[in-house]
Amino acid sequence: MQASIQLLKRAQRTSTKSGSLVSSSSQLTPMEECVQHYTNLFNRELPLDESHANPTMGQPPISIHHGQSSPSSKVDSGTQLPPITETSLLESGFLDNFTTDKIKVQLQRMSTTSSSGSDGITVIMLRHLLDTSFTEHLHQLFLACLRQGQTPKRWNEATIFPLCKDQSKPYTATNSRPISILAFFAKSLKPFCSH
């Protein structure tokens, strides 16, 4: 993740060299072309919510919303996910990963240079809350997500910055690669689920 952020910041510093994003098609705007290109690239049909498109830092971010998964939703293999019960959580060992102390340690480990997502929350903001009841509330929120088998809809949003690959060519969707910036709480929950 740190490398992605460094690439994003480097691209932003040099964005004046590559100019602004242009469309290679006269029928599509640069934003529409990027959405179409990345949708085809990731082989998904994802809606674009234009209220999140905020052309800052020299490049237009694209907000793509991933659907929420529910405990009974089908996975790609066509099999049903088992329902989440308190017993299955205890047996899985996931509950051992979710303690207020581990959340505090995780927040202290996170880089202060990571970008905030659409929520605008940064690590520095939350570090000031480590000695308050905030971590207990965050613990309860993470446990609720685990028990429900889903996260809040806003956590599933990613802001995508298309970075120019080859500066000698026009800066189009096909000459760019995406960097995704996630909401802070999605980033902070991920390490607990990947153990």
Image (cartoon, helix red, strand yellow):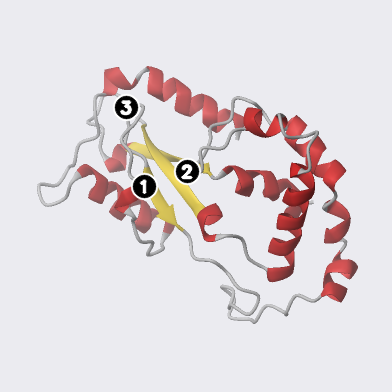
Q: Which residue is mark 2?
A: 118
Label 2 packing within 10 angstroms: few (<14), some (14-19), many (20+): some
Quarter of the image for the N terminus: give it.
top right
Q: Which residue is mark 3?
A: 58
Circle on res. 178: none
Q: Is residue 29 above or below residue 107?
A: below
Circle on res. 52: 1
Decide if residue 152 is on the left or right side of residue 160. Answer: right
Decide if residue 105 is on the left or right side of residue 181. Answer: right
Under mark 1, the amino acid is: His
Residue lying at 73% horizontally and 46% vertically, measured from the top left: 191
How far from the left and from the top, in percent, is residue 67? 49, 65
How far from the left and from the top, in percent, is residue 157? 48, 52
Residue lying at 89% horizontally and 56% vertically, measured from the top left: 96
Q: What whole-number distance in Å separates the C-alpha atoms at marks 1 and 3? A: 16 Å
Tag 1 and tag 2, C-beta contact below 8 Å = yes
Q: Secondary structure at mark 3?
A: loop
State the image quarter where residue 85 is shown. bottom right
Q: Residue furthest left?
A: 26
Between label 3 and label 2, give the one nearer the viewer.
2
Q: Earlier in the sequence, mark 1 or mark 3?
A: 1
How far from the left and from the top, in percent, is residue 152? 57, 60
